[in-house]
Image: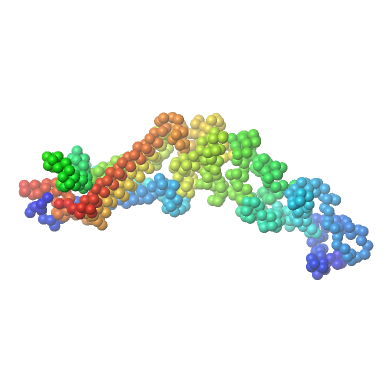
Amino acid sequence: MDSSPLIHDDEIFQRMNLAERIQHYLLISTFFLLMITGLPLFFYEFKAFKWFFPTEQVFYIRGIIHRVAAAVLIINLIWHLFYAAFTARGRNNFKEMVPKARDVKDAFELFWHNVGFTRFLYRLRILKNFFDAHPYWLFKSPPLFGRYNFIEKFEYWAVGWGSLVMIISGFFMWNVELSLRLFPLWVHDIFIMAHGYEALLAFLAVIIWHMYNVHLNPEVFPMSKIWLNGKITGKELRLLHPLEYQRIIEERKKL
Amino acid sequence: MVCHGDQGLKTESGKSLFVDNEKFLSSVHGLAEIFCVDCHADLAKIKDFPHSSPLKAVDCSQCHDTATREFQKSVHYSVTEKGKNVIAVGCKDCHGTHDIRDKADYDSTIFPINLPTTCEKCHLKKVAAKKGPNFIGQYRESVHFKALEKSGLTISANCSNCHGAHEIKKVSDPLALVARKNIIQTCGTCHVGIQRDYLDGVHGKDYVKGIKDVPVCTDCHSEHDILSPQNLNSKVYATKVAEVCSRCHDNLTLGRQYGFLTSRLKTYNQTFHGTASIYGETRVANCASCHGFHDIRPSSDPKSSINPENLPKTCGKCHPGASRHFAEGPVHVIPEEIATAKYKSSHLVKNIYIIAIAGIISVFILFIAADLCRRIIRKEKHG
């Protein structure tokens, strides 16, 4: 997208306000604590984890930290839900987060655009007539994203789903007597199984997907600073979130 | 005594011939007024003192005939290379010579607290056990010796309580007190209640039938180094007992032969109880917490602590108010062995997760690879 005179490339926009950043910090710290106090129980067969909790006392404290972190995570989540429901900005962000059919299309187009296989075939003049008639399949330009692209939406809703599973299963593991008053043992076993594997999924998703997208991706390497200062420049908006860029221009044209 | 009271009196080879008269007079023989000639019988024939010829070895059997008869059946009597019975270890080696004291005398070599030292004279180094040079010394670490030494409990087991005294036999001898066949009775001499519980349990019932694979006391508690179950190094310490039980209960051959489930340790470790136990948590349930220990019974036995009817009570020891729900699910069994379909649901959830995780992570990696392909190989940028 070409730069518009209505938005200067150096203009600063707020992508995450302070409340959103604090929610994110709390999520990071509780997630980290939950992982280091939880995953060693999933990977109990790795002897190396034994020095994580060398004594019975340390193991006991591990349990306390895990539960305190879980409680903070839940409070943070409730805060976020209130924020999304009762503030104008929160409501707007939430609306932008709603997944649409377009996101699936975006993912598909971005993938084939990145791979560039059809353009490679076209250069070799393979299926040239087909591509001339249907230039869409060349995926010449990447899909245009709005405020939140499919990657960000996926991560947001993954946190939502993951929290739901972890909180429900974790609550009943915490209160095992209550759980077994309500459910038979085989249901409780599902809680335990889901808690472990959902944790593994969350851990891998963050380590692989989120770390790539916000740290290791050459676009932002070594790190996108949005989570620290919440700022995004006009240029970044134009390149990474062109539809939002366009929307701002439309709004400014009306003024 | 005129001559033998001299500390310098020696044989030609330099062996001391000194006899401490005071010690002798305070010895059990001295006090009973049994004097030199009563034991050194050949002295009676000698008229000229000082006597020049060496005397014969003293024969204790003139008076101590019961002990001698027992002794003649023992390993100490019969150790010989040519199949001839000779005295390998004689009376004096354990009891001393002129200074023999009554067994109730604190200074006696066979007073319970002193006996281990007496046996160790030979058994620490000279006669090494097959199980290694430390095997016998380990006794000093044991709860039995601690009770003896620290608490002065002379009823605590010392060498002779388990191995016998005069009639001591090799462990391989079926008549030995420590032979597999007799060990339950031997330990049961003191641990009467435990012997009763053991014989009531599934192990004891098979033991009585003469099944050799069944564990006896020493298989779980070890032998010389028996420690209190509260001791961190005990083989039956809360976090270690699972390893002891799984020596047999994870053995496929034994499992097939006697028809019990294997993979016990693996499936236990998968539970929170097992995982926490690996990390040293002692308050979680170990094998013994649910199955009991000396009187372990199969779950089919209505008296068993893990009979489904009794599970609420057993689980309720730690989980107050435990209901029948505790029995409605699989407890550490491998999925293939679960008979009730709904009990397999957590296994199904696990498989769904494994497929989902593999799928999602593969998609992530594909997207990352595609992204890197554009940025690094083709050096294209956005915009």
Judge whether residue B225 can be spotted in this image: yes
| Residue under the point 82% across and 48% down | B65
Residue B329 in picture, x, y percent from top left: 44, 33
| Residue under the point 45% across and 30% down | B339
**Relative to B313, is A5 on the left or the right?**
left
- The colour scheme used to paint the residues is rainbow
**Relative to A32, is B279 on the left or the right?**
right
Judge whether residue A148 can be spotted in this image: no
From this viewpoint, which residue is outermost toward the bottom? Answer: B8
Q: Quadrant of the N terminus of chain B?
A: bottom right
Number of dots carrying numbers: 0
The answer to whether B350 is drawn above or below residue B6 in the figure is above
Residue A36 in picture, x, y percent from top left: 37, 50
**Relative to A229, is B7 on the left or the right?**
right
**Relative to A214, is B261 on the left or the right?**
right
| Residue under the point 50% across and 40% down | B264
From this viewpoint, which residue is outermost toward the right? Answer: B47
Residue B134 in picture, x, y percent from top left: 62, 55
Residue A101 in picture, x, y percent from top left: 19, 38
- Residue nearer the viewer, B172 or A96: B172
- Residue nearer the viewer, B367 or B49: B367
| Residue under the point 91% across and 65% down | B49
Quarter of the view holding residue B304: top right
Quarter of the view holding residue B200: top right
